[in-house]
Amino acid sequence: MKFVDLHAQQQRIRSNIEERIGKVLDHGQYVMGPEIGDLEEKLADFTGTRYALACSSGTDALLMALMAYGVGPGDAIFTTPFTFVATAEVVALLGATPVFVDIDPVTFNLNPERLQEAVHSVAEEGLAPFCDETGREGKLTPRGIIGVDLFGIPADYDRIGAVAKSYGLFVVEDAAQSFGAVQNGKMACNLAHIGCTSFFPSKPLAGYGDGGMCFTQDEELFETMRSVRIHGMGAHQYENIRIGINGRLDTIQAAVLLAKFEIFPNEMNQRQEAADRYHALLADIPGLVPPTVPAGTVSAWAQYSVLAGNEADRRKRRERLQHADIPTAVYYPMPLHLQSAFRKLGYRKGHFPVSEDAAERIFSLPMHPYLDEEQQRSIAEALRF
Ligand SMILES: *Cc1c(COP(=O)(O)O)cnc(C)c1O
């Protein structure tokens, strides 16, 4: 059994992919070829955003979003410690300070009440809860929030947005795992000032390599990110008006993504059906907590993550699955505030108990559009004891 079955998907669209790659080989515009604009237009349409900007990875999408806001030393950027490292890495890369805020125990996303407390503390005292880092004047300035749509479920952007508004902060949506998700009738990537997604091969909409995209309704932010994407260029290629990066998506990846996007809505339905079957099969397994999707939300089901009773129970269940040749994964075994890369921030175990508890108990089951009922029955069997 596969954790993510990319082969089954490829069989379905192989000829379309080969045809589209063939076209790129024919026209030869490997950098910023016509497929880039085509993909941007289609995905802007799909997400309901005005502007979309293809780029080299989900990490660079986040970096470009923060660069568009001119984030730098002394700035506090609030985010969750229960995420992939890239979310906070880009903050540190720009010399700003990631201020971690604990998560909600049900959705594993940023807890809006804890967020309000942390922002208040930085706004009033220039100091973040538990954090040793300060700005140039010995104080941090609250600048922005990065919400993360973990496992495909969007963070609570109504409440996050309300906190942001009252303190004049920007909100970036890390939608690397949630492309295709819906919250109160709006698509993921369109739930904050800038939405950033990833096309890494294991994400819901995935290429055959690295890729990402930024989405926004704001023309000025879009123009700035477009300049940042190509070395801070101005009106022409050799005029540089700011410091930027080489953040372009390859034309060949855009060609692959166009082929994959054709079947994406159907794949989303298949993921939802697989999630529904899991739900029915796992509902009565003692000691196992299946995911809960909040009202008004459709998950993109990047992962189907469950909670075991404790760390030993998780180990036991994963071993039973492994013996049945069923792969599992742990996202994420160590919250970011405990990673040595962020040691200088001064966080310690006990500072974010909900994140720490989730890291000890969570694990993810195989999830992809081609998972069938028989496979899911065998997974449920192995989990039951
Ligand atoms: C995958 C991921 C990223 C980074 O995307 P890349 O395309 O791998 O750079 C950022 N944030 C989250 C939550 C992710 O899952």
Image (cartoon, rainbow, N blue to C red):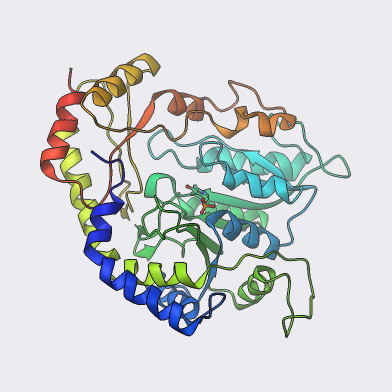
* Residue in view at x 47 percent, y 84 percent: 27
Q: Nearer the viewer, residue 294 or 44?
A: 44
Residue 288 point in image, percent of width and height: 26, 25
- The answer to whether any part of residue 192 appears in the image is no
Q: Specify the farthest residue to the right.
A: 137
Q: Nearer the viewer, residue 71 or 62?
A: 62
In the rendered view, does 222 fall on the left or right side of 343? left
Quadrant showing the N terminus: top left
Q: Nearer the viewer, residue 249 or 192?
A: 249
Quadrant showing the C terminus: top left
* Residue in view at x 27 percent, y 41 percent: 2
Residue 86 point in image, percent of width and height: 58, 46
Q: Nearer the viewer, residue 52 or 231?
A: 231
In the rendered view, does 49 fall on the left or right side of 299? right
Q: Specify the farthest residue to the top.
A: 312
Residue 202 point in image, percent of width and height: 39, 50
- The answer to whether any part of residue 196 appears in the image is yes
